[in-house]
Image (cartoon, grey):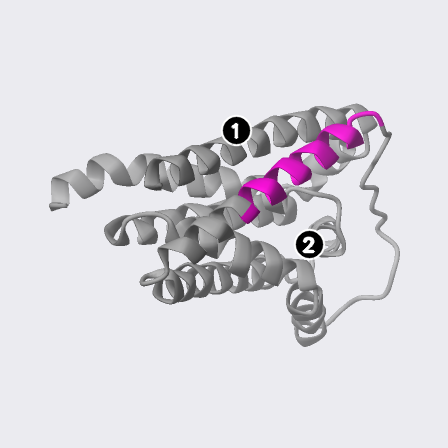
């Protein structure tokens, strides 16, 4: 695959990685609530957003490169993990669609003590690195899906998934005052969950098709 071919095929892979990353990261959770809180209070927003985005990018890159190396000579295991990823995405999508029937909100207040930069980063690290789902999502799931791409395109996939983290955390932190009223509306989360559910099912179908073609 030459440079021009890499560019032609790279952008669709980049977009696929970004869509997957957004689908996995956009959910009500402790990390998102903390970033939103810091944005509302305008405390160390750049540091918190930067830490969360860089941590995600490192985990995603390690997952893609590590899984690619581990699966390089094991096509059977690669297909098995791809199918497992397809099942996971299908279930994840079903759960997102199930949440459409519920009235969830993400409400934040301005109350609470002021955090120093070190304390804010320590909390961001705890919410990010002590969450077992981050390793399942960023390292195992995103890594195994990214490893299915040809070697020249794996970097594009990792960059796309990492870009999703940068965009989401930046929107939460720097756009908190504008986004908070929107997040407080159950209808907004229902629409978002519907989009996430549909997207996860499409990606699951693409994974199954990829496995079928490699048989």
As drawn, is 79 to the left or to the right of 137? left
Residue located 60% across and 62% down the image: 135
Residue 164 position, x and y percent, is 50, 45
Residue located 83% across and 46% down the image: 108
Q: Secondary structure at mark 2?
A: helix
Can residue 158 be seen here? no
Asked whether 160 or 199 is in front, the reply is 199
Asked if labels 1 and 2 touch by Cβ distance under 8 angstroms, the answer is no
Which quadrant of the figure has residue 48? bottom right
Mark in front: 2 vs 1:
1
Asked whether 170 or 196 is in front, the reply is 196
- Tell me, yes or no, whether the highlighted magenta stretch contains residue 131: no
Asked whether 78 or 146 is in front, the reply is 78
Residue 183 position, x and y percent, is 75, 35
Which quadrant of the figure has residue 9? top left
Residue 134 position, x and y percent, is 62, 59
Query: Dot 2, crowdedness within 10 Å: few (<14), some or many (≥20)?
Result: many
Q: Secondary structure at mark 1?
A: helix
Query: Dot 1, crowdedness within 10 Å: few (<14), some or many (≥20)?
Result: some
Q: Is residue 190 above or below residue 166?
A: above
Residue 25 position, x and y percent, is 61, 46
Q: Quadrant of the N terminus?
A: top left
For residue 35, the mark is 2
Q: Quadrant of the C terminus?
A: top left
Which residues lie in the magenta part?
84-101
As drawn, is 111 to the left or to the right of 172? right
For residue 45, the mark is none
Can residue 1 be seen here? yes
Q: Main secondary structure of the magenta part?
A: helix
For residue 202, the mark is 1
Residue located 64% across and 45% down the image: 172
Asked whether 3 or 198 is in front, the reply is 198
């Amino acid at each position: 695959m030459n440079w021009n071919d890499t560019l032609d095929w790279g952008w669709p892979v980049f977009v696929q990685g970004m869509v997957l990353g957004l689908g996995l990261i956009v959910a009500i959770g402790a990390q998102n609530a903390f970033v939103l809180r810091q944005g509302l209070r305008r405390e160390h927003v750049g540091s918190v957003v930067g830490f969360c985005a860089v941590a995600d990018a490192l985990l995603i890159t390690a997952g893609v490169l590590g899984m690619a190396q581990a699966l390089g000579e094991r096509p059977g295991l690669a297909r098995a993990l791809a199918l497992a990823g397809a099942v996971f995405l299908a279930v994840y999508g079903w759960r997102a669609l199930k949440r459409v029937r519920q009235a969830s909100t993400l409400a934040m207040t301005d109350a609470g003590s002021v955090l120093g930069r070190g304390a804010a980063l320590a909390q961001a690290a705890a919410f990010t690195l002590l969450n077992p789902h981050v390793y399942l999502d960023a390292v195992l799931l995103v890594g195994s899906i990214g490893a299915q791409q040809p070697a020249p395109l794996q970097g594009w996939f990792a960059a796309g998934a990492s870009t999703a983290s940068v965009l989401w955390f930046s929107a939460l932190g720097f756009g908190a005052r504008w986004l908070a009223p929107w997040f407080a509306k159950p209808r907004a989360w229902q629409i978002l969950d519907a989009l996430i559910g549909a997207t996860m099912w499409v990606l699951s179908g693409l994974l199954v098709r990829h496995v079928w073609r490699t048989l």
